[in-house]
Amino acid sequence: MLLPGTLELLILKAVSLGPLHGYAVLLRLEQLTGSALLIEQGALYHALFRLEEKRLLKGTWGISDNNRRAKFYELTAAGRRRLKSDREGWDRLAEVMRAALAATKSEV
Amino acid sequence: VWGRLLSWISSLGGLIGRSRAERDLADEAAFHLRARTEHWIGRGHSEREASRRARIEFGGLESYKEGGRDAKGFRFVDDMRGDLRYGWRQLVASPALSVVAVGILAVGIGATTAVFSALDATMWRPLPVERPFDLREIVILRSSGRVETSFVYPVFAHLRDHATSFSDIVLFDRHDQINLGIRGRARLAPGLAVSGNFLRGLGARMALGRPLAPEDDRADAAVVAVLTHGGWRRLFDGDPAALGEAITINGAPATVVGVTAAGFDGVEPGRPVDVLAPLMPLGTALYPNGLPFTDGRRRQYELMGRVREGISDDQARTEAARLAQQAAAGAGLSSESVSTLGLRDGSQGLESLRVEYGPQLRLLMGISAAILLIGCANVAGLLVARAAARNREMAVRLALGASRGRLLRQMFTECFLLGSLGSAAGIGLALLLRGYLMPLLNQDSAPLDLVLGLNVRLLLLSLGLLGGVGFLCGLLPALHVMRRDLRPSSARGLPRMATDRPRLFAGKTLISLQLALSMVLLTSAFLMARSLINLRGEYLGFEPDRVALFTVNPGLSGYEDTRALDFYARVVDRIAVLPGVQSVSISRYPLLSGEALRVIMGPETGGEEMEVHRNMVAPRYFETMGIPLLAGREFTQADREKAPSVAIISQSLARVLGGATIGQRISVLGREADTEIVGIVGNARFTSVRATTPPTLYLPWSAAYRRGAGPQMTFAVRTVGHPASLMPDIRRALEDVDPLTPAFNLTTQVEQNARSWRRERVFTGVIVGAAVLTVLLACLGIWGTLSYSVARRTPEIGVRMALGAHRGDVVGLVARESFVSVLAGTLVGLTGAVVATHLIEAFLFGVGRLDPVAFGSAVATVFAGAAAATWLPARRAAAVDPVVALRQE
């Protein structure tokens, strides 16, 4: 299960390693998360469209490895900044959550 | 909302872009599915199974596309189109309401647009020349505060030659009638005598040929002329062969060298000229008698200048004033003659038109804007009433998950749809209306011919009106939607009693205001109508039926003195023998044309000073005009030589002179008391129907020709049949005598009379129309509000009837709702009318400003309309079936 907002962050991360078409994003995400997260494919594309509309991703039509017309997504400058800030935010949240959940009775 | 509408419009144009986006969406999904299918094939599945798995994983294709559109912002467009379709269905579903609403808006928008276009043409449109905003009209400011626009020639010449703050100073003088000989025929046309630099100085553009040049404006130059575009169309039917053609200007041969570009018809918007001719070589042809045209005493010419870039108005004015003083001194004139110069904005030409019509146009603009506002209020009322009827639908849509914002948008979309239809119809109406608008404002009989075309300002107005109308109409229904209790009333426990007081109160105040305005307009309308009836029925002292009129000015063809009188005699003889002519005569001034010669009589005879109208008339004039001869005789041919030693006087003059009798001698034209009274005639209106009949002195027609070229004279021809049918014969008879002296102002006395109250007639039409409209609107408003109220109170009415109320009680219940607002509106309206009728007092004739008949009729009309508008909803309320009404609860 995905927390809201995490899918977009994951996509930004996936694409940050180089331009990918939609299907490759899916594969990359499965690879990055070790298939631990179930990603709905329709939702993935909707997220891609949203990110493109927000100008965090830039989509261009190109040719895939097996010579088919595919749309490739890459990070824009804004996307890169967003990835950085969201990642820091996520790290902080994870840290806080972990600390909070790890608290023992004596610490309260 | 407005911006959204625009974006919707633009997205209509962007449908191509949109279809590409749709294709991209599909392509991307296809690519994914193929890649995924191959993935599963690679895992050992059959192609069929692989494809099935891929599709299942991917999910619904439609929801994928929906999400794509959503993300890409197409959702709004789709919704908008849905709203429009839905709105259109709503309009079609209640056609009566839609037609009424569109009609109301169309009238308001049409009237506003028409008046605005007139206002635009008179007040705001710059002259179609280069850099019009550098142009200034040069005027003389008198210490009395009066502004004069006429200069003497020496001042112009000095300014033109020495002014450095102006790049050009041009001179012009309007001639209402120039006798043009074109292709062997004489045509009278308005023209300007101008300085040679006129066209270039103003920066006018040419359609054909060349503009006038300074070299054309020398006394020894060959006479050339430039036609204005309008003149070229009128005089030459737009024939390009006109260029280079030889014409005559008041008899002087001239050559056409150019035609101005379309739109440039002189410097006075609304008073176009046909021909522009240089002053110097034409001088004596244009100014045949009196002072030489360059004389320092002929204060005649108007000046405009183009201020150089970077020169302030103050600098320019100071320099011009200094030069004018020098010129006046040089020409031996008192410096008082140019005392203080002033500059006025000349970008739109002369200011006179703006000054003359501005206030009237603004008043009209106010009336039409008020009509439009009332119309919007009404449409809003109608829409609220309908929205109330749609409560259930709205509630269902809310329950199904529509947001309030969505419903609001729906409401406004419908209003803009109505507004757009209203605008389209209104602009059509404006095109029809504008032809009638300018005659309404035209005070004299001079042609006021404005080009009322579409332009950017008009377009902006239309868009602004559309936005404003859509917003105003949508506001009330939108508030209705925003109310919280938008659930079907069945969801509430108790039938709704009169819980809507505040909102209904707003509606009722609106109705009172509308009724008040209707009252004001209705009262004015009745007053105007009564005046018009009085004007038409007024006994004028002469018989206007079956009299044809036309005017000739032989002076423009070079006739002078006795030659002119002989010319008249020949024309009279010629026409007298035409079949169908009863009698013919001539006079200096036609009756009811507004023209007259007013002189002060009395002191020379030692009597009281008094104002007397004077006319010069030929034999049989009184017979022709049907003015009764009370004593003595008419003038005879023999009197031609005796003028001014014989006179005929009106009955009222006889009375003022202390009972003058035939044979008595009086003093006229400042001479000894040697003029013999040979006749006494009945009193006849002279300048207008309104003016009380003045004492009138008639002298023989030859008295008008004491020296030089005489003035124009008007022929009166009494016919046996309809006078208009004789016009061609008359024209031919005149051409037989001299083809180069044309008749103008061909008309009949009946038409002449009608023209003298034309303004009253048109104003009456406008006010009656506005009154009828506002009364109808107000009634519609009453009807709408009451219908709404009845719809809401149906359960309550049901309860009341179930408890034993009679139909009469129910009718009373509804009627009471409107009674107070009607009464309040009427009272406020009466007060308003008492004040407002001051404004039209000048138009009234034979009826008092506070005429009880007019006021009574207005009250009766308002009550009748209000009663009718109340009756329909009341009847519906009375028809409520208590069983059905309660079951609804």
Image (spheres, rainbow, N blue to C red):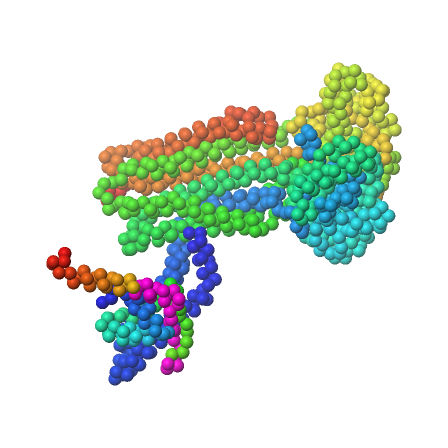
Give the tally of numbered discs. 0
| Closer to the camera in the image, B150 or B872 | B150
* A66 inside magenta stretch: yes
Q: Position of residue B604 (x, y in %)?
A: 80, 18
Q: In this view, does A3 lie above or below B686?
A: below
Q: What stretch is highlighted in magenta?
A: A65-87
Q: Can residue B385 be seen in this view?
A: yes
Q: Choose between B791 and A1: the one closer to the eye.
A: A1
Q: Is residue B597 left or right of residue B357?
A: right
Q: Residue at x 45, y 36 (%)?
A: B514
Look at 30% across and 75% down and name the residue there: A28
Pick the residue in front: B100 or B128. Answer: B128
Residue positioned most to the front: A106
Residue drawn at 19 percent across, 62 percent down: A99
Q: Measuring from the top left, give residue B490's x and y in whole percent.
A: 25, 46
Is residue B191 in view from this perspective?
Answer: no
Judged left or right of residue B683, residue B116 is left
Please state, as top left, top right, bottom left or bottom right, where the C terminus of chain B lies in the image.
top left
Q: Provide residue B788's location: percent of width, then percent of height.
A: 35, 41
- Residue at 35% from the left image edge and 38% from the top image edge: B504
Q: Locate residue B437 relative to residue B612 in the image: left or right.
A: left
In-front residue for pair B401/A2: A2
Residue B123 in the figure: left or right of residue B657: left
The residue at the far left in this view is: A105
Q: Establish if B502 lies above or below B464.
A: above
Asked if the stretch drawn in magenta spans residue B137, the answer is no
Quarter location, residue B864 = top left
Q: Is B197 placed above or below B154 here?
A: below
Q: Quadrant of residue B814?
A: top left
